[in-house]
Amino acid sequence: MNKLSKEKKDKLLLTCIGCAGAIAVLYFLVISDQKREIADLDSKISATRAKRDLAQKQVKRLSDTQGSLEEAKKILAQKQAEMPKPEEDHVWFIHIMEQMRPKYGLEVDDIKTPAPTEAGVLPKFPFRAVALNVSMLGKYTDFGRFLADFENRFPYMRIEIMSISPDRGGAPLARPGEAALATPVRDTSTLRFNYRVIALIKSPI
């Protein structure tokens, strides 16, 4: 290097500077653009993967929902098969009472003939309903257990309490909506429970 003339040293220096400048220009104009493109591609790939994962989850959820819907349809069909039929007498209900009441130590005093009534649920409900007035004798706590079991086992029927009174005369101890219902009733006394059963019937309107 020391043997080179000043002119050659200047040319060599200029060449080095030019090479460095060319490399810098190449880096900023080509490599930087490629890095940005790679980063954009990575971002698009990540977004695509996220969409794919979401689509797979939705497909699985749809499959699970479809399975649940089919299971619900089977349960609904089974429950509809158990519903009373139009114009049917109340022997079906007496049979239910005879199956359930011994478990709770209750006695059925009277069951009136079913009469058509409003279902009282949703507008344009696709099933009609019948009402049965029932009188039953037993203990307060036993009847409470019977009531919970009855409505859980027969979701197409519901019970409306009309009155609770002592078995042998006397004023009613409680009526729906009155504060007296919150007062403990003597478990040792036999009570008369008058209630109405609203039952959906199998045939749609």
Image: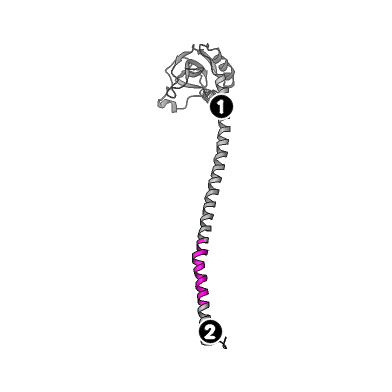
User: Disc 1 versus disc 2: distance between alpha carbons?
Assistant: 94 Å
Position in image of residue 61 (x %, y %): 55, 38
First to last magenta residue range: 16-33
Residue 70 screen position, x and y as percent? 57, 29
Question: For residue 72: magenta?
Answer: no
| Along the viewing direction, whichever of 89 and 38 lies nearer the viewer | 38
With respect to residue 92, does 73 lie above or below? Answer: below
Around disc 1, counting alpha carbons within 10 Å, would you say few (fewer than 14), some (14 to 19), or many (20 or more)? few
Extreme left residue here? Answer: 178
The residue that appears at 53% across and 46% down in the rendered structure is 51
Q: Is residue 71 above or below residue 88?
A: below
Position of residue 131 in the picture relative to residue 67 (left or right): left
Which residue is more in the foreground, 36 or 156?
A: 36
Magenta span: helix, strand or loop, mainly?
A: helix
At a point 56% along the width and 39% down the height, the residue shown is 59
Determine which residue is flagged by label 2: 8
